[in-house]
Amino acid sequence: GAVVSQHPSRVICKSGTSVKIECRSLDFQATTMFWYRQFPKQSLMLMATSNEGSKATYEQGVEKDKFLINHASLTLSTLTVTSAHPEDSSFYICSAPRTRNTEAFFGQGTRLTVV
Amino acid sequence: QQQVKQSPQSLIVQKGGISIINCAYENTAFDYFPWYQQFPGKGPALLIAIRPDVSEKKEGRFTISFNKSAKQFSLHIMDSQPGDSATYFCAASMGLSSYKLIFGSGTRLLVRP
């Protein structure tokens, strides 16, 4: 079964509103989670690294004020897309490693459509 | 130097055939090379992974071949089935404690019945 769960799986929002996406590790604690963005028929691009109890680390070119990341507990990281615009429409995916030396499991993804 | 180049972009194989997808990298600090399978509208799922200390790893119908000197690795899917039709991504990362995966561009595989 899934070990990393994302919610919601799909969301449609109006331009200018904010949307929150949750990523949960189901049966393990994750001090680190990763957020990726994937445009149609393209690869996954790492947006940021979410660290429990500290600030997220953003990749170059990713606006930290637009994509707010909160990792308040060892099992939950949230990505909030603020003031969403149609160009933010994408597939957002989180991942989390079970331990420091194992591979990361991916969530099922969230399809965001901004209209 | 952070790139992972993947080919082909798309691949059509007859049922029972062998599917081969290739990846190349530049950064010699990469030491973990996984392959992911992704179905439409789903997150990627780990298929198989290899570290540079071995040249080949096999799990069921899936085999990774790794050529450290050429900085290339490939995925072979034996006895390809229609259910294998998906997008496949190679990836690379460095350091045992690093999960910052750098993904290839993806290969859309179609296995015809």
Image (cartoon, rainbow, N blue to C red):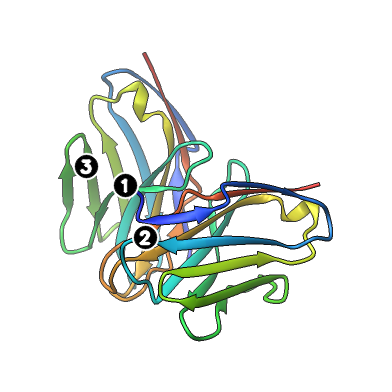
Residue closest to the eye, B5 or B102: B102
The Cα–Cα distance between marks 3 and 2, rounded to whole angstroms, is 30 Å
Q: Quadrant of residue A100?
A: bottom left
Kind of residue indicated by mark 3: Thr
SS for callout 1: loop
Mark 1 packing: few (<14 Cα in 10 Å), some, or many (20+)?
A: few
- According to the picture, the residue beneath numbered tag 1 turns out to be A1
| Chain letter, disc 2 residue | A
Q: Amino acid at mark 2?
A: Leu
Query: Can the viewer see residue B35 in this picture?
Result: yes
Nearer-N-terminus badge (1/2)? 1
Residue lying at the far bottom of the rendered structure: A54
Residue beneath the point at 38% across and 68% down: B99
On the same chain, marks 3 and 1? The answer is no
Task: Confirm or deny contact between disc 3 and disc 2 (CB under 8 A).
Answer: no
Q: Chain of mark 3?
A: B
Could you say which disc has been placed on residue B63 in the image? 3
Up/down of B89 relative to A75, above or below? above
Q: Residue at x 40, y 65 (%)?
A: A96
In space, the residues marked 1 and 2 are separated at their CA atoms by 10 Å
Chain of the residue where label 1 is placed in the rendered structure: A
Image position, residue A23 (x, y; %): 49, 62
Judge left or right: residue B70 versus residue B61. right
Q: Are marks 3 and 2 on the same chain?
A: no
Q: Which residue is mark 2?
A: A26
Density class for disc 3 (Cα within 10 Å; few <14, some 14-19, many ≥20) is many
**Is there one chain holding both mark 1 and mark 2?**
yes
